[in-house]
Image: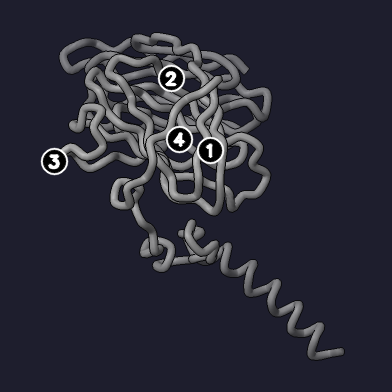
Amino acid sequence: MFSAVTWAVGTVVVVALAFLTFPSMAINPRTGEVLVGRDAGDADYTYPWDTGAAELHIVDGEVHGTRAGGYLRLPGGSALLSLTIAGATDDDEWIRVYQQQGTGLDPEASEWEWPGSLGALYPDADVVVLPGSEDGLLWFGESLGDWTVTVTYPEVTPMTGTASGKGNALLEYEGEALSGRFQHIGTGIFLVSAVTVGDWNSLINEVDDVDLRASWDQTDRVVFQVVADTGDGSWTITLDTPAGTEPDPAPTPAP
């Protein structure tokens, strides 16, 4: 009895330490194995464009796929897409999403650019896709089983130098600024990501009061994906003006 209790307590401690100690964790989508640390970066993963994954289609606002993944043809100039995994309740259920340019709509093009990662679909999380001006492909990676993704076309708010608000938002910027000040006053999460054609980067990942600067790679267009819907906070984003122009003072968000 004593040894059983000791083993159980020891197991809990080991698991807790693993979550606290290892900065990287992942799940092998082919086996379901939990990988931590360096193993997470070296997971046995096969890219969908290397396996002849099937073409998928948006039907009545949904995409149905299998554990092998697949691809959507993404015509140039399409509207911004938001993808949400439907019906998932297990944190292990996730699907990597990639955007590919330079292939047109042909998944077997002889010359093509390496697809860029847009992150992954998790329960209660979405992936925003900014289509390019040219035709391309949207790839879905391997998963633990069959899946359904809901596709919506969210409203995007154009912004110039400054934007303020509460809750979630999608802000599209076209200009020369490559950095900015991100402020949040109040309670709740404050997440800001930079979505570009074929790329996604987390800029801010904080809670409650925040006053930070962040930058992004040079690009013609960027969509700031703001997630701030768990508290009473308000936020302001102030972008740097181009060199040679006197910047306006950054506003302070209202409490």
Please state the total of marks drawn on the protein image: 4
Asked if disc 3 and disc 2 are in contact, CB closer than 8 Å, the reply is no
Any part of residue 25 in sight? no
**Type of amino acid under label 3:** Ser
Using the numbered discs, state the Cα–Cα distance from disc 4 to disc 1 in whole angstroms. Answer: 6 Å
Q: Position of residue 88 (x, y in %)?
A: 64, 41
Pick whichever, 117 or 202, lies toward us.
117
Q: Which mark is residue 206?
A: 1
Tell me what residue is drawn at x 12 percent, y 39 percent: 111
Categorize mark 1 by other alpha carbons within 10 Å: few (<14), some (14-19), many (20+): some
Q: Which numbered mark, 3 or 2, is in the foreground of this view?
A: 3
Closer to viewer: mark 4 or mark 3: 3
| Earlier sequence position, callout 1 versus callout 3 | 3
Query: Where is mark 4, residue-wise?
Result: 204
In the foreground, 195 or 180: 195
- For badge 4, the amino acid type reads Ile
Q: Judging from the image, what secondary structure is the residue with disc 1 in?
A: strand
Q: Earlier in the sequence, mark 4 or mark 3?
A: 3
**SS at mark 4?**
strand
Q: Is residue 148 left or right of residue 46?
A: right
Q: Which mark is residue 243?
A: none
Badge 2 element: strand
- Name the residue beneath numbered marker 2: 237
- Of circles 1 and 3, the one toward us is 3
What residue is shown at x 58% (from left), y 27% (from top)? 228
Identify the mark at residue 110; answer none if there is no mark: 3
**Nearer-the-camera pick, 91 or 49:** 49
| Disc 2 to disc 1, C-alpha distance | 14 Å
